[in-house]
Image (tube, rainbow, N blue to C red):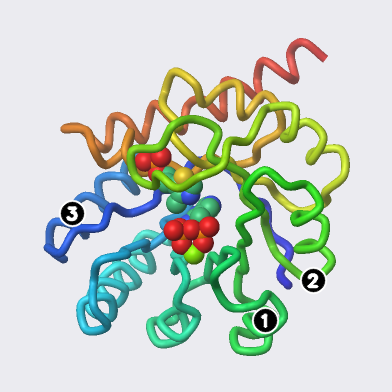
């Protein structure tokens, strides 16, 4: 387990087959201030996943942005990504750690369950993710998480918290204010004409929310 400050915008890539387009969209997101990129593609076959993950790995290394691979620990190793994100249908945390080693990031989906998050932390997760907080256009089979859960989790966890699911520029601030260190976004970021602009707007929310906190405390 590595100790790192997880902060800011976490981009979840859209499931598209055009690798050049995927890289250009991701490059724009990084230019707008994205701190973490998650390669998530549920429709690609092995060859396309490998090609896309390799291309994103090169891109992220070029800009010093962390790349997380969704689901596939073997792909993360293959492309020398910074870590993986796993959920309830994926590899166990302890097995992932054995394969990836102590220097890689392991993120774990905890849906709307604090108990899962406490267990994930004990097993060596580097961050936990809660959600969906809102209705997601990207993933429909989700459970709903609340800001109360975020506040409770903030008190009990020592590792960073990521919020995900239907997050927009209009609803993100309340998640940050309730203790989310990072917000993971797909549609609101990649479904727009000006990805760089939207990424910048999301990134500014962190700065503003933190400023509001420190000036009022
Ligand atoms: C940051 C982040 N949080 C949650 C998820 C969802 O993971 P999972 O439950 O394994 O579902 P899939 O994404 O695999 O459909 C995530 N990918 N990233
Ligand atoms: C992977 C995942 N897990 C819960 S919601 C979601 C999708 C996030 O994408 P969007 O920001 O478009 O809702
Ligand atoms: Mg998964």
Say whether residue 52 is left or right of residue 158: left
Instruction: Quote the CA–CA distance across marks 3 and 1.
Output: 31 Å
Which residue in the structure is indicated by mark 1? 97
Residue under the point 87% across and 44% down: 156
At label 1, counting other C-alpha atoms closer than 10 Å, the crowd grade (few under 14, some 14-19, many 20 or more) is many
Residue 33 lies, in percent from the top left, at 40, 41
Counting residues from the start of the chain, the first of labels 3 and 1 encountered is 3
Residue 103 can be seen in this image: yes
Which residue in the structure is indicated by mark 2? 123
Whether the residues at callouts 1 and 2 have beta carbons within 8 Å, the answer is yes
Query: Residue 208 has which mark?
Result: none
Residue 65 can be seen in this image: no
Residue 2 lies, in percent from the top left, at 71, 69
Which residue in the structure is indicated by mark 3? 24
Residue 160 lies, in percent from the top left, at 70, 49
Q: Which quadrant, please, contains the N terminus?
A: bottom right
- Label 2: state its secondary structure: loop
């Amino acid at each position: 387990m590595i100790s790192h400050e997880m902060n800011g915008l976490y981009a979840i890539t859209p499931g598209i087959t055009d690798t050049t387009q995927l890289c250009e969209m991701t490059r724009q997101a990084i230019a707008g201030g994205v701190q973490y990129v998650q390669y998530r593609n549920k429709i690609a076959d092995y060859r396309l996943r490998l090609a896309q993950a390799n291309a994103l790995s090169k891109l992220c290394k070029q800009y010093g942005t962390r790349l997380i691979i969704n689901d596939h620990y073997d792909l993360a190793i293959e492309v020398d990504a910074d870590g993986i994100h796993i959920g309830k249908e994926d590899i166990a945390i302890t097995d992932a750690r054995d394969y990836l080693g102590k220097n890689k990031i392991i993120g774990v989906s905890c849906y709307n369950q604090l108990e899962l998050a406490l267990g994930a932390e004990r097993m060596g997760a580097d961050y936990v993710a809660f959600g969906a907080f809102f209705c997601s256009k990207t993933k429909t089979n989700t459970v709903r998480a609340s800001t109360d859960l975020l506040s409770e989790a903030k008190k009990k966890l020592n590792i960073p918290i990521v919020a995900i699911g239907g997050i927009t520029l209009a609803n993100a601030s309340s998640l940050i204010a309730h203790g989310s260190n990072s917000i993971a976004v797909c549609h609101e970021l990649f479904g727009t004409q000006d990805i760089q602009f939207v990424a910048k707007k999301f990134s500014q929310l962190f700065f503003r929310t933190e400023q509001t906190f420190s000036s009022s405390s």
